[in-house]
Amino acid sequence: MPAPSHSHAQKTNNARQDMSVILVTGSYDHEIRFWEAWSGICSRTIARSGESGQVNRLAISPDKRLLAAAIHKKVNIYEIASTANEHLVTFEGHTMNVTAVSFHSEGKWLVTGSEDGTIRIWDLRNSSLHRIYDNGAPVNDVVIHPNQGELISCDQAGSIKQWDLSDNICSHELTPAADVPIRSVTLASDGSCLVAGNNRGQCYVWRINDEHTGLPRYQAVTRFSAHTKYLTRCLLSPDAR
């Protein structure tokens, strides 16, 4: 049997890439669109007819089965493989814009942060609210620690907080520059580093130490001016290198 041609092999490879890469966009036009990332072809549009609210944030579950869309004050959960416009469930409870959304690594729960000053954990197994944390200031970002037992949030008051899910408390708080809003936080995939960016374009870097070492949990490493204006997002590479 003759070997597959180069063009055939390339097409097969592209098809595999199309299936493995999921690209989703959301907009102020209220639509959510799914794309074939390698071709730029729109494969599905969720028009959300009769439903108001811009799409603030999107998150894809680790198993690529679910899409969480933060739409104004609520979060809709969609099935990625479906072709229907209808969502599976809606999580409601926030009273202002949802600014952050993230999935648990095993897809058991979802965390959201909001301008209403609360962080909420939603149980995806029974579609219910599991827990609420009062942050005390509008929340700009929330990320889940790689150990899945802690949350890191940042807010308009300039604070970065670690929430311990076992003890159900805020166990650490950092305030790099009082009253300067922290816009974004990001964690290394191995949990060794935390980076935050603020409204003045400053980036702050901390080493995260094991609490059994006797060293501070968050050890300041450096601070630098990343931008001359408002910083919107910071992100560490997945391999933590």
Image (cartoon, rainbow, N blue to C red):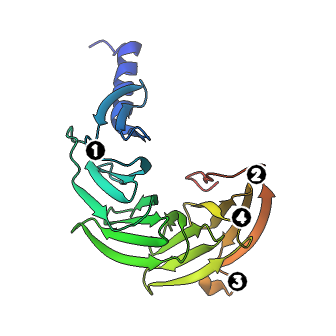
Which is more N-terminal, label 1 or label 2?
1
Could you give the CA–CA distance between mark 2 and mark 1, rounded to whole angstroms? 36 Å
| Secondary structure found at label 2 | loop
Could you give the CA–CA distance between mark 2 and mark 3, rounded to whole angstroms? 28 Å
Pair 3/4: label in front? 4
Which residue corresponds to mark 4? 205
Marking on residue 226: 2
Which residue corresponds to mark 3? 215
Q: Residue at x 46, y 72 (%)?
A: 118
Residue 231: horizontal and vertical position, in percent? 67, 52
Residue type at mark 3?
Leu
Which residue corresponds to mark 1? 80
Toward the viewer: 202 or 17?
Answer: 202
| Secondary structure found at label 4 | strand
Could you give the CA–CA distance between mark 1 and mark 3, rounded to whole angstroms? 44 Å
Could you give the CA–CA distance between mark 3 and mark 4, rounded to whole angstroms? 16 Å
- Above or below 8: residue 27: below
Residue type at mark 1?
Ile
Which image quarter holds the C terminus?
A: bottom right
Is 11 displayed left or right of 78 in the figure?
right
Label 1: how many residues lie within 10 Å, few (<14), some (14-19) or many (20+)?
some
Q: Residue at x 69, y 58 (%)?
A: 199
Label 3: how many residues lie within 10 Å, few (<14), some (14-19) or many (20+)?
few
Pair 1/3: label in front? 1
Which is more N-terminal, label 4 or label 1?
1
Marking on residue 126: none
The answer to the question of whether label 3 and label 4 lie on touching residues, with beta carbons closer than 8 A, is no
